[in-house]
Amino acid sequence: MTTSGETDGVTAAPAGSREVVIVTGLSGAGRSTAADALEDLGWYVVENVPPPLLPAVLDLVGSRPDLGRLALAVDTRDRAFFAALIPAIEQIRERGFDPYVLFLEATDEALVRRFETSRRPHPLQADGRVLDGIGHERELVADLRAGADLVIDTSVLNVHELVAKVQAAFDDLESRRLRATVMSFGFKYGIPVDADHVVDARFLPNPHWVEELRPLTGLDARVSDYVVADPRARDFLDRYGDLMHLVADGYLSEGKRYVTIAVGCTGGKHRSVAIVEHLAARLVKDGVETLVVHRDLGRE
């Protein structure tokens, strides 16, 4: 039986290249939240799709242009499903679609905390610990993560921040505007794994060594003024703004509409926070939709 838009059981991509997003990633990293955010944006979302069924689901709904943009949240609850996921995505491409893969991840610490809070076992832990399951899953999805179009680390994001990040990335996938997340972090806590650009602000004078500024953060006007009073800080902000102008067109032409800029200092409390606030303000002024995240603020 052949329905409209199908030929011999294979769905041809509708004219105009139908938008399809595959939502996947590590268990506990926020897949359901991301899917809900897409649904709120008007995407037609199908959740808990086993990877082997992805092409069949797309055959079923792909010929329905009235359903709008499609998001398929992939259920990867056992090893066989993991093995089938990449081939399933390739089958979708063979049908003429160009699926955009969103991969969600988080640190071991964050994932363990979430599983313990929910009192549910990890789907791959078997008779072992939650951490064992997480380790097995990371190994299985390594190739998928490497080929993802967008990786979001949800370790320090609350539900509202994750929703905002997904909405910024997918509100209008065909938009020619670049969207950015500008994140402060502390090098002593590690570099953000989802950063496209990593900037080191440790070349600037450290407010930590100014007694009256030490207990404050980069959100305080006194710290912010101290940081940007240095001519090198102002020069950096000017030059980095120019750099983003330079790379934006290239990103967009390559289909990359979302960039994460991570600015680090020693502890993620003073310099990086101040620079992020000023850089984000400049990007907004230049028409870049910008989300600010201070990953390690308050961690000390």
Image (cartoon, grey):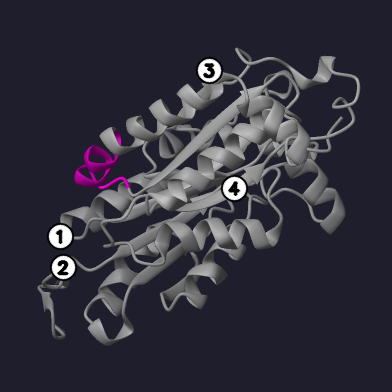
User: In this view of the protein, can residue 170 be seen by the observer?
Assistant: yes
Asked whether disc 2 touches disc 3, contact meaning CB atoms under 8 Å apart, the reply is no
Residue in the picture at 15% in, 73% down: 14
Q: Nearer the viewer, mark 3 or mark 1?
A: 3
Mark 4 or mark 2: name the one nearer the start of the chain. 2
The residues colored magenta run: 247-256
Q: Position of residue 5 (x, y in %)?
A: 13, 79
Q: Which residue is mark 3?
A: 232
Question: Could you say which is closer to the camera, residue 144 or residue 37?
Answer: 37
Q: Residues within 10 Å of mark 1 (few under 14, many from 20)?
A: some
Q: Which residue is mark 4?
A: 292
Asked whether disc 2 touches disc 1, contact meaning CB atoms under 8 Å apart, the reply is yes
Q: Which residue is mark 1?
A: 96
Mark 2 or mark 3: name the one nearer the start of the chain. 2
* Residue 262, numbered label: none
Taking the magenta stretch, the answer to whether it contains residue 254 is yes
Mark 3 or mark 1: name the one nearer the start of the chain. 1
Left-right relation of 103 to 184:
left
